[in-house]
Image: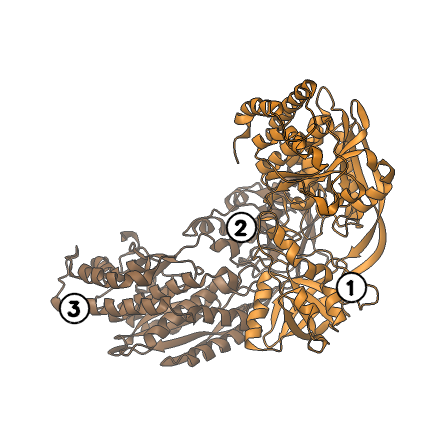
Chain colours: A orange, B brown
Amino acid sequence: MKNYNKTLCAAMILTALSGCQSNQSDTQVTNETVIENNKNNQISQQLATKALSSSLSYDIVESLTVEVGPRLAGSEKDIIAVNWAMNKLESLGFDKVYKESVQVPAWYRGSAKASIIAPFEQPLVISALGGSVSTPDSGIQAQIVRFDTLADLQAADPDSVKGKIAFIDHKTERHITGKGYGKSVGGRSRGAVAAAEKGAVAVVIRSIGTDHDRMAHTGMMRYKDGVAKIPAAALSAPDADMINAMLKRDDNIQLLLNLTSKNLGVATSYNVIAEVTGSSKPDEVVLIGAHLDSWDEGTGAIDDGAGVAIVTAAAKLIQDLPNKPARTIRVVLYAAEEVGLVGGKAYAKQHADELTTHYIAAESDFGAGEIYQIDFNVNPAVFEQVKVEHSGMTVNGVKLGNNKATGGPDVSMMPSLGVPVASLRQDGTDYFDYHHTPNDTLDKIDPKALAQNVAAYAQFAYIMAQSELDLRPLAKKDDKK
Amino acid sequence: MKNYNKTLCAAMILTALSGCQSNQSDTQVTNETVIENNKNNQISQQLATKALSSSLSYDIVESLTVEVGPRLAGSEKDIIAVNWAMNKLESLGFDKVYKESVQVPAWYRGSAKASIIAPFEQPLVISALGGSVSTPDSGIQAQIVRFDTLADLQAADPDSVKGKIAFIDHKTERHITGKGYGKSVGGRSRGAVAAAEKGAVAVVIRSIGTDHDRMAHTGMMRYKDGVAKIPAAALSAPDADMINAMLKRDDNIQLLLNLTSKNLGVATSYNVIAEVTGSSKPDEVVLIGAHLDSWDEGTGAIDDGAGVAIVTAAAKLIQDLPNKPARTIRVVLYAAEEVGLVGGKAYAKQHADELTTHYIAAESDFGAGEIYQIDFNVNPAVFEQVKVEHSGMTVNGVKLGNNKATGGPDVSMMPSLGVPVASLRQDGTDYFDYHHTPNDTLDKIDPKALAQNVAAYAQFAYIMAQSELDLRPLAKKDDKK
């Protein structure tokens, strides 16, 4: 962790200079714009300085994880979390605090047990995948058939799979961007359908995670109409290794799987929203979001208590400024992200008419690692100017990146609806060690890194709320730089 | 990991030289001794070279953890482990393989559940401590009273404890020697008695571990005649942290604890023994041991599958020598170490008449980290010569240490019975991250470090089986250097 505070004053001078430099776009930069940008930079640096010395974000995530804890969408705890959020946002003095109802799928985890029955009896550590059906009360016992990847299962001869339990053994690679997850997660979300299409009676996967702890990683899976719904669970990495060691000894590994999970239909949850009302363009919105729901085996600290804390604390810093920025800052704490971006989709639908006045949107949902880069998806004609406006963030360790941002899960549909987005890229090297496991607890959050995130979000939100640039139209999908 | 092989030839010259140096003891070193030592060193280096390029030790611990897995003393799996050990030792071709029955306490873990009921409902991750009684079927609900240490509980006013659940929150420090464990483990073993003496209805402890995983560390606890037997469990470190965060908010934390564990009386287990018969002094014994039993939530890889593998593979290298050493090498795989050094104590009793011909004993029971030092407890008059004899081990990364060894848990009573011991000190920096948790699995073992252990044990056992030194009598307890 660098000492940001010490270099902030120097940075204010540097970023002021960068605001004066000629830029490569065709747009003329007026003297007024330069002066305005310098003023904005100055305030954004002050926000960063305050963020780095404040414990507010850590206090928020401690409060959420200790006073609420696990908050699975559609559960009783989900409503407790909504009430917590309303109270917290109100106590922080935002200009507006409200909630919008969302219908979310509800699912009961129940118990998840598994053991190898033969050739060697061994209890296993598993987790039911979210949305999985139960097994019969007596469980399902069958031979394991192993595949390196989902694609290998999809390519398999059905005769080799029929009546067996498919085991997708895809290892997740560690990477700062988390890109290993994208390669392996298909086995979790689509493994049950692929296995059932081949006649399997259940599917188990190597956890989608980068750790070697004896904990399994849960996460959402999906069924498909017309394809048998078979039970689905994740194995801890050491248990996946053990099955491989057994397969070296014997082809016929008999697994007994017993899940009591079940889908409970639809429940009501809420997107919880707070606003800092804009001073001169109150109808234009800079949206910073995170999701309030979590998986249920940890306390939802890195996923996504951290995000809730980051965007709330960033907005609170702007709320407390003597002069509010031009546009409204809207904090959206989404419902039911984990079970299918439900709150994000509902928000986009409920606010469809208002999206033309959404200036830009970003979601924090990748833990609490330091932000090392900010990417955008804005009108390519102003991209370079947008970067210049954000150059003050470099002092806080944030590089100015590319124009290919997706914005985060709950705002991922925004670009297709014409809304610009930004991605404030967090160091996710360790994120998938803990993600969706009992290990997602408060101790995995470094308060200093969390505060650096708040600083970056406060800078971004303030600058965007003040910018004079027209961020639309976005590049067509095939035409991004 | 250094490249030991490359330097072994150079070492043979060096250690030959060291054998020729004058030493500080009063004993005269004859020419014959020097020549003999050099020959012993040469063979011990050959053993080390073979050990470092062999996968036998890893194969053994893989076999034990995959084919047997958890093997709690007195359980069905314990007997499966005994049979596994007999078969494994016989298949390796030792001169003798036999077992000796031991009566061991049997305990049923059952389920262990806990949750905070108020002021915030939170499920906790706990583990029943070995030997704990159950709670009533409906559990025990009471207020938590927290103590930094066992000593603080012992010093508490009984009025502050009576009717409550005592919480001993002692953090275990990380250290290469594992000495942090010694400071905190009293809360586990003696916490229930101390709490009951003050009128507590149950005791929970912060896990005796150095990790921050949401796993609890089990381990043995004891009751005392005349003191109420109250249930005892360990909390994961994140759960202990959570309780502290709650105590900042409210003094009255209500914990609901439900254990179904019970003591099952006495069962029969076995010390499993293999021997390489000595060529000229077959009745004199160099004992290298490990324990075969394990806790039941992991697969007993580092505790103590690694030790089983290390001493077995080391003895096998000596078994395969064209010329056996003078003394017998005896591998003892002890029963029921975890539940009170039961196999070690039984061995000492059953072999009481033979202990005068036990030349030296050592146990490997601290994981699979590299051995960085060898300590002895031998006649101080020959200590310097003993070190000279072992100087070849320095090439394998093993420093020659002090004369204050305890020898390992199952041989810890040996010095008081007159038997010299050695401690081959393993790097235990990470040992208490995994110890007694579900995380004690094969993947935590580095095959290279394991092979380095085998090299060190083979060198030690061979040199001791050939030594002409008289290692007795030991220094009196207050008179060690």
Q: Residue at x 43, y 69 (%)?
A: B57
Residue type of the residue flagged with mark 1: Val
Above or below A32: residue B169: below
Query: Crowding at label 2, few (<14), some or many (≥20) Cα neighbours within 10 Å?
Result: many
Q: Quadrant of residue A398?
A: top right
Which x, y percent locates residue A267?
Answer: 85, 50
Query: Crowding at label 1, few (<14), some or many (≥20) Cα neighbours within 10 Å?
Result: many
Mark seen at residue A133:
1
State the separation of the CA atoms marked 2 and 1: 34 Å
Residue A128: tell me if it is visible.
no
| Proximity of marks 3 and 1: CB atoms separated by less than 8 Å | no
In the image, are marks 2 and 1 on the same chain?
A: no
Specify whether B274 is left or right of B470.
Answer: right
Specify whether B261 is left or right of B41.
Answer: right
Above or below A294: residue B71: below
In the image, are marks 3 and 1 on the same chain?
A: no
Which x, y percent locates residue B183?
Answer: 46, 48
Residue B139: tell me if it is visible.
yes
Specify whether A398 is left or right of A79.
Answer: left
Above or below A179: residue A165: below
Mark seen at residue B211:
2
State the separation of the CA atoms marked 3 and 1: 74 Å
Residue type of the residue flagged with mark 2: Asp
Which x, y percent locates residue B463?
Answer: 27, 67
Above or below B35: residue A346: above
The subunit carrying tag 2 is B
Q: Which residue is mark 3?
A: B35
Label 3 vs 2, first from the N-terminus? 3
> Is disc 1 placed on a helix, strand or loop?
loop
Q: Residue at x 54, y 23 (%)?
A: A10
Residue type of the residue flagged with mark 3: Ile
The subunit carrying tag 1 is A
